[in-house]
Amino acid sequence: MSNYSDDKGYTKTDQSFLKNYNITKVLNILRQYERLSRIELSAVSSLDKKTITNITKRLLEDKQIEVVEYRYEGMGRPKAMLGLRGDYCKCIGLDLGGKYISGVIIDFTGAVVCSHNVDIFSRIEPEMLIKISYNIIDNLLKKAKISMEEVNGIGISIPGFIDKETGMAILSENIPLWSTVPLEKIFSEKYNKPVYIDNNSRLMAVAELWYGKGRDQKDFLSFDLGLGIGCGIVINHNVYEGGSGKSGEVGHTIVEVDGPLCTCGRHGCIESLASGWALDMQVQEAIKKGVPTLLTEMKSGEGSSATKADIRLAAELGDEFSIKLLERAGEYIGIGVANAIDLFNPTLVIINGTLVADNEVLMNAIRKTVEEQTMPQIYSDVKIVESEIGVLASAIGAATLCLEKSTKTE
Ligand SMILES: [Zn+2]
């Protein structure tokens, strides 16, 4: 999954690759700038005018782009302003989060046509999760007022790995009942559409690379802080997959040798100390021990757990336990972020995820720790920002997998 790049990561002898590369580059520029004249396209893309004329002719014939308006400037001929045709393709993206399923439909411009979200219980049976996903897709189609025939394909974001051998099996630690589920087969047989699957943290990085703050960045890291903790690594405008597609497991780097047991079977991973599920366990334990906290009153009923929103609100109301809990979590996460910055020397770090959304106490603790724990010479080169895309990023990234495959370059 790559966005356009000005760095020449290709050999010029490979003509068809170069042609596809240039077409993708023009499409992505139009996705970013919305409407440009051919002259402007040539300037932004650094492609000569003849190449731009050929590419735009071809894209107009394919109905991937259209003349959006004619711009009159001075005495000369009006300039045709070109833009993407949103209805050229529609792609569905599903994000199977541990505690929610989100869905979006995006059009060819990358704009979100509609979205739908359902909260779920994390120990949900696979059959039920699939049923809910089907229901989300039905709702998305209704909201967008389109039928499945008009959809090009489905992208699915999962909190786990894809088995490259079978192309189907997944291993998801945060959805324990899903050891191996042939998701691709299930969805492609149901809808008779192409289905693409990837890891949620990497897809979050895809969304940042295509539409977010990572758009103009060559190298950046995007952190996904939610039920689990993951990282999307972008190197030279490409999301780095790793040798077998399992890159970015920053949540399973160990920060306390004798720390608590993690879902991966080891002890003291960042996830075992600071993820959504770890905080949940720490709250339950504290309440059992009778530690004074507002959370005791905020839990909605016996046995139910405090939500991230409860902890955030309690901290804002001055609850000492909740403030300490979030500050400690921010420290562990901050160490993970600092270690990753030291390893990759990115110019930008984007923070996102349900754990950190609107959570100032946690975000401040992360920022403070990153500043303290990153090598000063490397820290001075990096900017740390929060995502503008927000919690739908992984679903949008999943839909973008499909959008990329739907783009006709041949
Ligand atoms: Zn672990």
Image: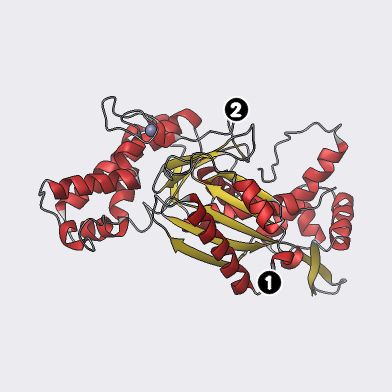
Local secondary structure at mark 2: loop
In this rendering, position of residue 409 left or right of residue 387: right
What residue is rendered at 20% in x and 59% in y?
A: 302
Left or right? Give the position of 83 relative to 325. Answer: right
- Residue of label 1: 146
- Residue drawn 30% across the image and 57% down it: 307
Foreground: 167 or 70? Answer: 167
Local secondary structure at mark 1: loop
List x then y, in percent, for residue 226: 40, 49
Residue 334 is drawn in which quadrant? Answer: top left
Seen from the viewer's position, the closer of residues 7 and 309 is: 309
Which badge, 1 or 2, comes first in the chain's sequence? 1
**Looking at the picture, which amino acid does disc 2 mark?**
Gly
Left or right: residue 209 compared with residue 39: left
User: Which three-letter amino acid code belongs to the residue tagged 1?
Assistant: Ile
Q: CA distance from mark 1 to mark 2?
A: 39 Å
**Does residue 216 appear in the picture of this structure?**
no
Residue wearing tag 2: 243
Q: Quadrant of residue 16?
A: top right
